[in-house]
Amino acid sequence: VWAGDPLPESLAGVEALVVMGGPMAAYSDDGFPTRGAELTLLREALAAEVPVLGVGLGARLLAVAAGGVARTGSGSQVGATAAP
């Protein structure tokens, strides 16, 4: 959820979801008040076979929503960064 934007109340009219990353943890509500609602939405998307792309935290949330496990890796995390 970007800057307090609301989550969709349903998947009606949604063709796909892209769930991006963030500094929060997939298994904790600390600093992540929408985690439960996001997991619910992801589970609904999976059940409805709505395509979902998860990036970073989004991928970990998708794994949890699908009944999988998200673990902290032992290596460094590599990705692109945009300057402001």
Image (cartoon, rainbow, N blue to C red):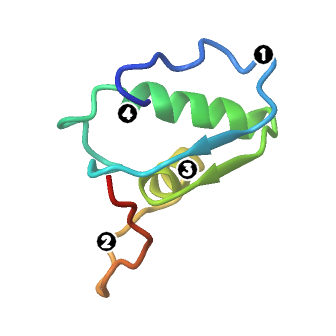
Give the mark nearest the N terminus, 2 or 1: 1
Numbered label tally: 4
Q: Which residue, as the protein is rendered here, is positioned at the far top?
A: 9
Q: Which residue is mark 4?
A: 35
Residue 81 place in picture, x, y as percent: 38, 66
Give me the C-alpha separation between circle 2 and circle 1: 34 Å
Relative to residue 24, is residue 15 depicted above or below?
above
Kindly check if marks 1 and 3 are in contact, taking CB atoms under 8 A apart as contact: no
Give me the C-alpha separation between circle 1 and circle 4: 21 Å
Q: Is residue 69 left or right of residue 33?
A: right
Give me the C-alpha separation between circle 4 and circle 3: 11 Å
Q: Which residue is mark 2?
A: 72
Three-letter amino acid code at the position of disc 2: Thr
| Mark 4 nearby-residue class (10 Å; few <14, some 14–19, many ≥20) | some
Front of the two marks 1 and 3:
1
Three-letter amino acid code at the position of disc 3: Leu
Give the mark nearest the N terminus, 2 or 4: 4
Give me the C-alpha separation between circle 2 and circle 4: 18 Å
Q: Is residue 50 left or right of residue 66?
A: right
- For the N terminus, the image quarter is top left
Residue 59 place in picture, x, y as percent: 52, 57
Three-letter amino acid code at the position of disc 1: Ala
Q: Is residue 45 left or right of residue 37?
A: right
What residue is shown at x 55% (from left), y 50% (from top)?
62
Q: Nearer the viewer, residue 38 or 21?
A: 21
Mark 3: which secondary structure?
A: helix
Give the mark nearest the N terminus, 4 or 3: 4
Q: Which residue is mark 1?
A: 12
| Mark 3 nearby-residue class (10 Å; few <14, some 14–19, many ≥20) | many
| Mark 1 nearby-residue class (10 Å; few <14, some 14–19, many ≥20) | few
What residue is shown at x 27% (from left), y 52% (from top)?
23
Residue 38 place in picture, x, y as percent: 48, 31
